[in-house]
Image (spheres, coloured by chain):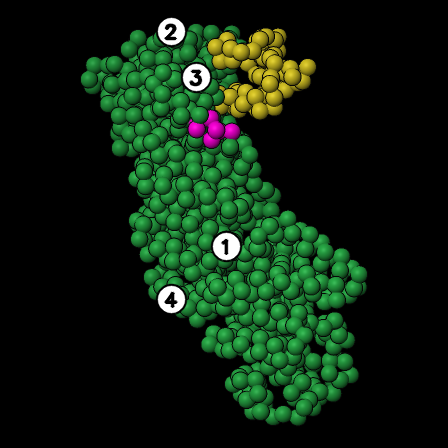
Chain colours: A green, B yellow
Amino acid sequence: MTLSIMPTKLQKPQFPPDMVVKPETTRLLSTAKINIVSAQAGSGKSTSVSHWLSNQGEPYIWYSLDEWDNDLAQFLTYLTEGIKTIAPEVSGQMDQLLSARQTIGDEALIKSFTTLVHNIRQSYILVLDDYHVINDEMIHQMMRALIGHFPLSMHLCIISREDPPFSLAKLHSQRQLTALRMSDLRFTLLETESFFSKNLNRSLTSNQLKYLFERTEGWIAGLQLTALSLQGVEDIDHFIADFSESHYYIIDYLLEEVLERHTETIRQFLLKSSIFEYFSPELCDDVLELQPGEGEKCIEFLLKTNSFLITMGSGWFRYHHLFRELLRKRLNLMERDIITTIYLRAGKWFEGKERHQEAIEHYLNGGHNELAAALIEFKWATMDLELRSSSWLDMANRLPEDLIKRSPVLSLGVGWALLDRGEVESCEAWFDIAKKLYDQWQDWALRGDILVNDLEEFKQMPVTLMNAKAYIAAVMGDYALLLKITKELQILAEQHYNKKQWVLETFVATVHWGRGELDEAIYHMMRVKNEALGPLNPLVQNSMVWVIAELYIQKGQLTQAKILLEKAIEEVKREGIVPILMATYYLYLAMIASFRGDTDQAFGLLETSKSYGHQYEFMDWQYKYYTLKARLHIQNGSWDLARRCIIKGRNSDFKNPIPESFTIEDMDLWLTLKTEEDEHALKYRIDEAINALEPFLEDDPSYTTEMKWKLIFKFAPLNSYAAKLEPICRILLDRAKIQKRWLHVIEYSVLMMRFIKSEAVKQSLLSSAKQLALDEGIELPFVEFSESLPISDKVHANLSLREPLTTRELEVLELIEKGLSNQEIANMLFIALSTVKSYNNSLFGKLEVKRRTEAVAKAKTLGLL
Amino acid sequence: MKYEIVIKGYIKDHLFEEFEMTQQEDFTTKLSGEFVDQAELYGVLRRIQDLGIELIAVIPV
């Protein structure tokens, strides 16, 4: 885990022991699995929950939220840290998941994290205090996911000043939720009486009590402040008379009373220390320039007098939010100079302790923007590595824009953060600013007021800027540009001793891949995977497995891909690694099965993939899943199912810098061409497809358009297109041969047969393709790309079945009709006898018959034979 | 856009310096001011809530 944790945020606040708590609230909290405690500031929410926790037996996690927690990674990091005490193993797996955040994506992270929360067996209570500060939609989504599939072992308690943005009506009606609101927390007259008798060492008359109860409306903050103001008051009736004449907001009035009664030392301490969210005696002595030990004395005094001070443990304290808010307002009435000095000292103190978030906050509050900017600049490199660029951007955006525009590193950071969000256009303006400032800095005379703090990052800027360009080129699929940039990058990176050499290496691999040079791509990806260029995060390393497997498959080295994937699956199972990548691994196994012509096995493996994908999902898994499934359905002639997959695949589209060998758009084209019955319309479609590709046809067709060309070769009516297409098909066949992409060589050989008239040449193409296919058991190209016929009545008949027969089942059926025995069919199709029997059973089921003879008869009446 | 926000009780000036503040006879306070957008309005409402002050009305004028 890379994010630092402030332990105080995970400690249950300790309230004074003589605090009065309504017994009713404790009972209510234990009645349902989900509690929402929602009421205004100072109504005793945290006190009630804290009291309840202390009086029950289950372990709990208390998480005090603040503005900084509006960041999914930070939020989940704290949860993970909290869970460590409850279920260390699950917490360890969550750690793995978080360190892999960059390769998973937020949506998938939420899904996988929720699954892990369900793995906690020990029952426990999770308290999220001050949830109203959260406005990050991803965190809300995480909580909705959790509440939607609520874990059995969890008891959730959300404390907030306003109702959280979840729909709770259903939970309410199912009695799974209790809400504790102002009406439950407000003190009754009786409770008010017992409160004062505990907190004042004198008694009040019933009239006095009644007045104070009515004036405060049983609001606990009001009562507490009243008790505080009454300390040292001689004439209570007089106090009440003044109180009732004032129509000021009760807290405002009482605070003034309290401050007036305190000594100057305490008054100053209260006001000045209100700038801290959390404070320790040492911090106060130093920042407020007190005599050593004075901070501790003040804190002790305030604790003794019940002055809204809450103990956080480990020697840290905080004020009640409401009280602090009012003190801060009053502090602002002091001289501006005094205030900015305190903020400056506070910023320095926290910076010295390397608590940068707090330091930045104090610098910003005191108007010390350049100091804040320097720290924010230093944070960029680490936060970018942790993929928290969007949180970094929120922080940077608090600086004045003209300040950012004076700092090359900050401008660069803003550009990167925008690029991470996919805002390609707006990021380039920031990169330009960064570049301009960088160049200007090189000339002493031009430096002017340019701000450079993080020299290390500044020196790397040319490499970082070039990396950004490379990334944009890869996403846009502009491999010519990417190649050019990569070459420049290599030189630059060497000059600058750049540490992220492996990123560059993946760009090099991508360039080769985009040009169909798969061997070279494999070589470079292997170097990255084997950490030849420095250590990798385990998940990045594991995700190289599927990247390399995909490359092997595109090459036609199916066995090698399969061994690689099976080894990775075995390792996940053996080592108990979080199975984030399993869905993707099984997907590629399904792809291998489909290239081997085993559609049934492919569907089976896809099912396994889906069962993992439901729990843990990796980046573009869903997109890939629907693309492959659409292809399988097209092979089977299940047009409707294929169409549905295409729609779903489009909805889960994912921009990936890695070249795809077949896309969802390819599947759409395939389906369109295959189902087009009208010849004129077919020609129109073919023209349209060719026109879309031709602008790119300056040299040879690019590698990523090859699947579209294959489809055009397969479906274009020969009489009008043969002359045009034959040379292109030949070029692609030759290129595949030179690049040793055997799968593609087979595919183009089969496709080429359409354009050849001589039977002898056709046969030789076919037999050399079959020869190539033999070792790896490749079958699919012969099914997919061999001479296509117009849709026959047979296909129509098959499609009218509730569940159409697969290609293999139809084959078996035809052989049964010819009178072959099961053993003979097995021999003929080179499959096991048991496999034939299972095909029989499945096709009997689909035809709703029991015997071979019945099947043949039924098939004939249906028009299948 | 201009809004008037009415809250319960009287408050000291320093709590919401940027607004024109009127103490009304019914012991409520009216805060009037110009807002850039809805986000700014919600920010002020959040501050009122943070202080535990009771909100009575928000009126566009």
Q: Earlier in the sequence, mark 4 or mark 2?
A: 2
Position of residue A514 measured from the top left corner of the image (x, y, whole percent): 50, 53
Q: Which residue is mark 4?
A: A567
Query: Amino acid type of disc 1?
Result: Arg
Query: In whole angstroms, how far apart are the C-alphas of marks 3 and 4?
Result: 62 Å
Query: In whole angstroms, how far apart are the C-alphas of marks 4 and 2?
Result: 69 Å
Q: Residue at x 59, y 60 (%)?
A: A707
Q: Residue at x 48, y 21 (%)?
A: A401
Magenta span includes A528: no
Task: Tell me the chain of label 1.
Answer: A
Q: Residue at x 36, y 64 (%)?
A: A571
Q: Earlier in the sequence, mark 3 or mark 1?
A: 3
Q: Earlier in the sequence, mark 4 or mark 1?
A: 1
Q: Earlier in the sequence, mark 3 or mark 2?
A: 3
Q: Is residue A763 above or below residue A36?
A: below
Residue placed farthest to the left in the image? A292
Query: In whole angstroms, how far apart are the C-alphas of marks 4 and 1?
Result: 29 Å
Q: Which residue is mark 3?
A: A326
| Magenta stretch, residue numbers | A429-435
Query: In whole angstroms, how far apart are the C-alphas of marks 3 and 1?
Result: 66 Å
Position of residue B24 measured from the top left corner of the image (x, y, whole percent): 61, 9
Q: Which residue is mark 1?
A: A515
**How would you rate the neighbour count of disc 1 (Cα within 10 Å): few for under 14, some for 14-19, many for 20 or more?**
some
Answer yes or no: are tags 3 and 1 on the same subunit.
Answer: yes
Position of residue A39 measured from the top left corner of the image (x, y, whole percent): 51, 30
Which tag is nearer the camera, tag 4 or tag 2?
4
Q: Earlier in the sequence, mark 3 or mark 4?
A: 3
Answer yes or no: are tags 4 and 2 on the same subunit.
Answer: yes
